[in-house]
Amino acid sequence: MQQRYRVQTRFSDPGRYAALLDDLPADLPDLMAVVRNVLVHYQAAGIRFTGPRLAEIDSRRVERLLELDQSRFPVPLAQPRPEPDRVVVCCRDFALLTVAALRHRGVPARVRVGFAPYLADDWNYDHAVAEYWDGDRWVLADPQLEPSRYPFDTADLPQFLTAAQAWDAHRRGLIDADNYGASPGLPFRGHQFLLDQVLLEVAHRRGDEVLLWDQWGAITDRSADELTRLLLAADRGDTAAERVLAERYATDPDLRLDGRVHCMSPSGFDGWVSV
């Protein structure tokens, strides 16, 4: 089952920039440091990006991220870049570039979508992280984070909450959904937000690593309950659940991504695009 996660997707494929990944560190913390050297978060860095620079956050493919980087720095990825000149992204892109580099070396890896309770004391930010197979188990890692600033191992996360785990906890009345979302000051939170995150998690697991603000389909509470059951079972190693999940996503017209998404981006873009 891990074999499919060794293969690049249309989103993680570095394309004509694949050679840039050849010499990246094998050690995961060192690899994540290189990723942070190439990318900068559009909000967390505390730098105000506008116009075309902010629009970089809508780059869906690793090949495009590397194209932007190389247009400014036609040098190896490990060579230092000034933070303001790095490619402007969100958490999903830190995860996706890390996953692309791991897959490039034949390591099974995937992007996980959910929530990061470790980013704030009183809020659960929606977040994306990388997950890789170390030969014995799936390990979660957060390449966006500078390790020295956190009291835990960012290369082996202790408390990331997947979208399925959050939805399950919400349905059982164990969490307050209004404390889960994009930001405390925005309306993107609560029941509907958790619902949409379940579909995003399934899509990313099936290789459609779209932007976190891409929307499509028509997921319902009932289908989210079913998908959550399958996701949680698959995470426990249930290969039958993994197969059913794959079939459901591929065949259900209300769930599968058929080539167009409604993008509602922090860059200000709001419209339908082909992916």
Image (cartoon, rainbow, N blue to C red):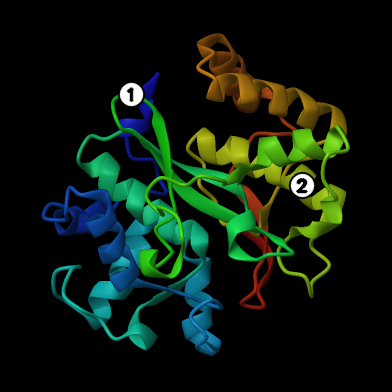
Q: What is the number of the mark on residue 107?
A: none
- Name the outermost residue toward the left: 23
Measured Cα–Cα span from mark 1 to mark 2: 30 Å
Place of residue 104 in the rendered image (x, y in percent of width and height, measured from the top left): 23, 43
Residue 249, quarter of the rendered image: top right
* Discs 1/2, front: 1
Say whether residue 49 is left or right of residue 170. Answer: left
Neighbor class of circle 2 (other Cα within 10 Å; few <14, some 14-19, many 20+) is: many
Q: Residue at x 33, y 40 (%)?
A: 8
Q: Is residue 38 visible?
A: yes
Please name whichever residue, 137 or 34, is drawn nearer the observer in this view of the structure: 137
Q: Residue at x 55, y 89 (%)?
A: 50
Q: Residue at x 20, y 68 (%)?
A: 77
Neighbor class of circle 1 (other Cα within 10 Å; few <14, some 14-19, many 20+) is: few
**Position above or below: 237 against 31:** above
What residue is disc 1 on? 136
What residue is disc 2 on? 194
Give the residue type that dot 1 points to: Asp
Please name whichever residue, 250 or 28, is drawn nearer the observer in this view of the structure: 28
Q: Are marks 1 and 2 in contact (CB under 8 Å)?
A: no
Say whether residue 220 is left or right of residue 244. Answer: right
> Which sits earlier in the primary sequence, circle 1 or circle 2?
1
Place of residue 9 in the rendered image (x, y in percent of width and height, measured from the top left): 39, 40
- Name the outermost residue toward the front: 151
**Position above or below: 1 against 36:** above
Place of residue 269 in the rendered image (x, y in percent of width and height, measured from the top left): 65, 74
Q: Residue at x 28, y 40 (%)?
A: 103
Residue 262, quarter of the rendered image: bottom right
Give the residue type that dot 2 points to: Leu
Place of residue 166 in the rendered image (x, y in percent of width and height, measured from the top left): 72, 41
